[in-house]
Amino acid sequence: MELLYASCIGVLVFCGVFLILRARTFPVVLGLTMLSYAVNLFLFSAGRLSLNKAAVLGYSTEYADPLPQALVLTAIVIGFAMTAFVVILAIRARADLGTDHVDGKESAKKGKVSS
């Protein structure tokens, strides 16, 4: 199970970095989202993978660690806000530059010079 979990984290990191290195803004946003999912899985694994352990105190002799779960919930909320902010920035850059390329050089090739 640990090998599968580590492989999923590795695939998400690889796909996230691959998409971040693209020239357009939408793949960059998707890459940041996939990278944040990988970090969430990594944080969740910090509490150790365990089965049949109680999450609430008082019902069992063995308990799951609640701290990684709280960190992942916080990271999900922050990641969602960050994704919304980056999407708004990408829409604004598309409106101002006339292109969705990250460096903005596509508009200069078509004869439009951005100042």
Image (spheres, rainbow, N blue to C red):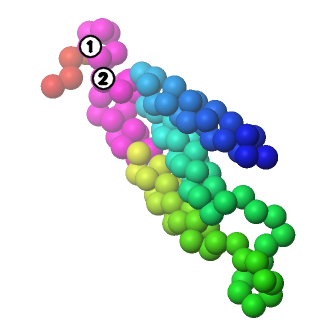
Percent position of residue 53, x then y? 79, 73
Residue 93 location, quadrant: top left
- The residue that appears at 66% across and 41% down in the rendered structure is 6
Q: Amino acid at mark 2?
A: Gly
Find out whether residue 109 is within the magenta segment. Answer: yes
Residue located farthest toward the right when viewing the structure as drawn: 52
Whether residues under marks 1 and 2 lie with C-beta atoms below 8 angstroms apart, the answer is yes
- The residue that appears at 57% across and 41% down in the rendered structure is 34
Dominant secondary-structure state across the stretch colored magenta: helix
Percent position of residue 29, x then y? 48, 38
- What is the spatial separation of the Cα atoms under label 1 and label 2, in whole angstroms? 8 Å
Which stretch did the figure color magenta? 87-111
Residue 100 location, quadrant: top left
Residue located farthest toward the front when viewing the structure as drawn: 61
Percent position of residue 37, x then y? 58, 48
Q: Which mark is residue 108?
A: 1
Q: Which of 80/5 is in front?
A: 5
Left or right: where does residue 83 sit relative to residue 47?
Answer: left
Pointer 1 local density, CA inside 10 Å: few below 14, some 14–19, many at least 20: few
Check disc 2 and report the residue beneath it. 104
Q: Which of 93/4 is in front?
A: 4
Q: Amino acid at mark 1?
A: Ala
Q: In the image, is residue 41 above or below residue 29?
A: below
Q: Which mark is residue 53?
A: none
Q: In the image, is residue 47 above or below residue 106?
A: below
Residue 52 location, quadrant: bottom right
Residue located farthest toward the bottom when viewing the structure as drawn: 58
Foreground mark, 1 or 2?
A: 2
Q: How many marks?
A: 2
